[in-house]
C-alpha cells in the first residue's frame, strides 16, 4: 500500500489546556515518526511526499474565511508582541448576542475554535497544509487506479468543522479528501471514522448532504470528548437525512462490543454503495491509550482492516488520533496489513 508522508508535520508541536494546566500536547511529532518507522519495518510499500495543492482545494469542506484565519492567525498573534503559542480564551456560547467575526486575533481564536487543544505557532499552517495535502494526494492515487492508500496525516483532522478547529485538528483531512473526490465527479463517498472520539467536524461538514455518508464508532459523548456531538439521534438533515450514522459505545468497550458496531457500520456503508471509502483511522481505541476509554488490543486492529477490506471499495486511510506512542505504529499498520490480507 502506498503511504503519503511529509516531514513538514514537525513544524507543528505544542501545548494544550488539560486538567486546568497548560501542558505538552498528547498530539506530538513522535506519533507520526513511530508510524512511519513501522510502515518501513513491515515493508508496507512505497512512501511518497504529498503533491502541493492550492489553498482553494480546502474550500468546500471549509469556508474561505476560516482558511484565511488559519493562514494569518500566527502573524496576527505574534504582531501583538506575544511569543507564546496562540490559544483561544473566550467562546461565543449559547446566549451571547453576537456571532459576527471579531476583528482582533484573540476574538478570532475563540470564534474559530471549539476548545483549547489546538494551539497555533509559527509552523502550524505549513504543517496543516501538508497534512491535508497528504490526504489529497492519497485520494488522487485512488483516482488514478490504486485500490488503497495511507495518508499519514499529522496534525489530525476529524474534529475540525467547516469553520472551526479543535481537538488537535485544523483542516479536516478526511473531509477535504472526500470533497476533492466529489469535485472530481464521484456521486457517493463514504467516511468511516474509527477514532475513539466522535468525528464531530466531519459530521458538521456533511450533515445536510446526500453525496457523503458519515459513519462513526466512538465513545459515548455523554461521558467522552467531544461531548457536544456524536449521539445516535444525530442522523443528518435535509438531503443528508439518514446519512449520518453515529454508533456511540460505552467506556470500557472491548472487541466484542466494538466488532458488533463495526459489522453494523460495514452493512450501512455497503447499502450506500459508495464509489470511494475514506477511513478516519484513529488508534486511540487501544487499551493503553492515555486519554481514551476503549479496550482494543493489538490483534484487533488486523480484524478492523479485514472487515473494511470486505467492502471491496477503493479506500483511503487517513491518520487521526492515537496517543500511546510506543504502540501507535504497530496498531495503525496492523489495520493496513489486515486490509491487505
Ligand atoms: C484527533 C483526536 O483524537 N483528538 C482528541 C482530542 C481530545 N482532547 C481532549 C481529551 C480530554 C481527555 N482528558 C483526559 C486527561 C487525562 N489525564
Ligand atoms: Zn481521537
Image (cartoon, rainbow, N blue to C red):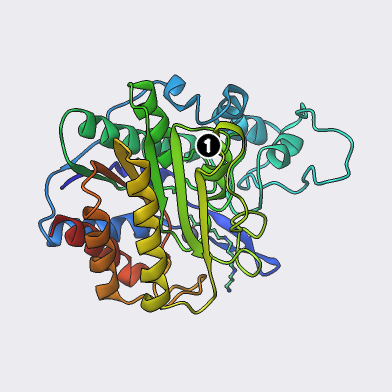
Is 251 placed above or below 313 here? below
12 or 140: nearer the viewer? 140
Tell me, yes or no, if residue 62 can be seen here: yes
Mark 1 vs ligand 1: CB below 8 Å: no
Residue receiving disc 1: 206
The answer to whether residue 156 is left or right of residue 237 is left
**Residue name at image x 42 percent, y 23 percent:** 57
**Residue name at image x 32 percent, y 26 percent:** 52
53 or 318: nearer the viewer? 318
Q: Disc 1 on helix, strand or loop?
A: helix
Query: Where is ligand 1, by quadrant?
Result: bottom right
Q: Position of residue 320 (x, y in %)?
A: 41, 53
Q: Position of residue 31 (x, y in %)?
A: 36, 59
Packing grade of label 1 (10 A; few <14, some 14-19, many >=20) is: many
Q: How many marks?
A: 1
Q: Position of residue 313 (x, y in %)?
A: 24, 43
**Residue name at image x 67 percent, y 66 percent:** 21
Q: Quadrant of residue 297?
A: bottom left
Q: Quadrant of residue 42?
A: bottom left
The quadrant of the picture occupied by the C terminus is bottom left
Q: Position of residue 140 (x, y in %)?
A: 25, 29
Tell me, yes or no, if residue 50 can be seen here: no
**Residue name at image x 41 percent, y 41 percent:** 174
Amino acid at each position: 500500500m502506498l503511504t503519503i508522508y511529509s516531514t513538514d508535520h514537525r513544524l507543528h508541536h505544542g501545548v494544550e489546556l488539560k486538567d486546568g494546566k497548560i501542558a505538552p500536547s498528547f498530539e506530538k511529532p513522535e506519533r507520526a515518526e513511530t508510524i512511519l518507522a513501522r510502515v518501513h519495518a513491515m515493508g508496507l510499500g512505497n512512501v511518497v511526499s504529498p503533491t502541493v495543492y492550492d489553498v482553494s482545494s480546502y474550500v468546500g469542506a471549509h469556508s474561505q474565511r476560516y482558511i484565511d484565519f488559519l493562514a494569518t492567525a500566527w502573524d496576527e498573534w505574534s504582531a501583538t508582541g506575544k511569543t507564546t503559542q496562540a490559544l483561544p480564551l473566550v467562546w461565543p456560547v449559547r446566549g451571547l448576542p453576537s456571532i459576527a467575526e471579531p476583528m482582533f486575533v484573540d476574538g478570532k481564536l475563540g470564534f474559530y475554535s471549539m476548545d483549547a487543544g489546538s494551539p497555533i505557532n509559527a509552523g502550524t499552517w505549513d504543517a496543516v497544509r501538508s497534512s491535508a495535502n497528504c490526504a489529497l494526494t492519497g485520494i488522487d492515487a485512488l483516482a488514478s487506479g490504486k485500490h488503497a492508500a495511507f495518508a499519514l496525516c499529522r496534525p489530525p483532522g476529524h474534529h475540525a468543522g467547516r469553520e472551526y478547529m479543535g481537538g488537535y485538528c485544523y483542516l479536516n483531512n478526511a473531509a477535504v479528501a472526500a470533497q476533492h473526490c466529489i469535485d472530481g465527479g464521484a456521486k457517493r463517498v463514504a467516511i468511516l471514522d474509527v477514532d475513539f472520539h466522535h468525528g464531530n467536524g466531519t459530521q458538521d461538514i456533511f450533515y445536510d448532504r446526500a453525496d457523503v455518508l458519515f459513519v462513526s464508532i466512538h465513545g459515548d459523548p455523554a461521558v467522552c470528548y467531544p461531548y457536544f456531538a456524536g449521539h445516535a439521534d444525530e442522523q443528518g438533515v435535509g438531503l443528508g437525512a439518514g446519512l449520518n450514522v453515529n454508533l456511540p459505545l460505552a467506556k470500557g468497550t472491548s472487541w466484542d462490543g466494538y466488532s458488533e458496531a463495526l459489522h453494523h457500520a460495514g452493512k450501512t456503508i455497503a447499502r450506500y454503495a459508495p464509489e470511494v471509502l475514506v477511513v478516519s483511522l484513529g488508534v486511540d481505541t487501544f487499551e493503553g491509550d492515555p486519554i481514551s476509554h476503549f479496550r482494543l488490543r493489538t490483534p484487533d486492529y488486523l480484524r478492523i482492516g479485514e472487515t473494511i477490506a470486505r467492502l471491496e471499495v477503493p479506500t483511503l486511510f487517513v491518520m487521526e488520533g492515537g496517543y500511546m506512542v510506543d504502540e501507535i505504529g504497530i496498531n495503525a499498520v496492523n489495520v493496513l496489513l489486515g486490509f491487505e490480507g
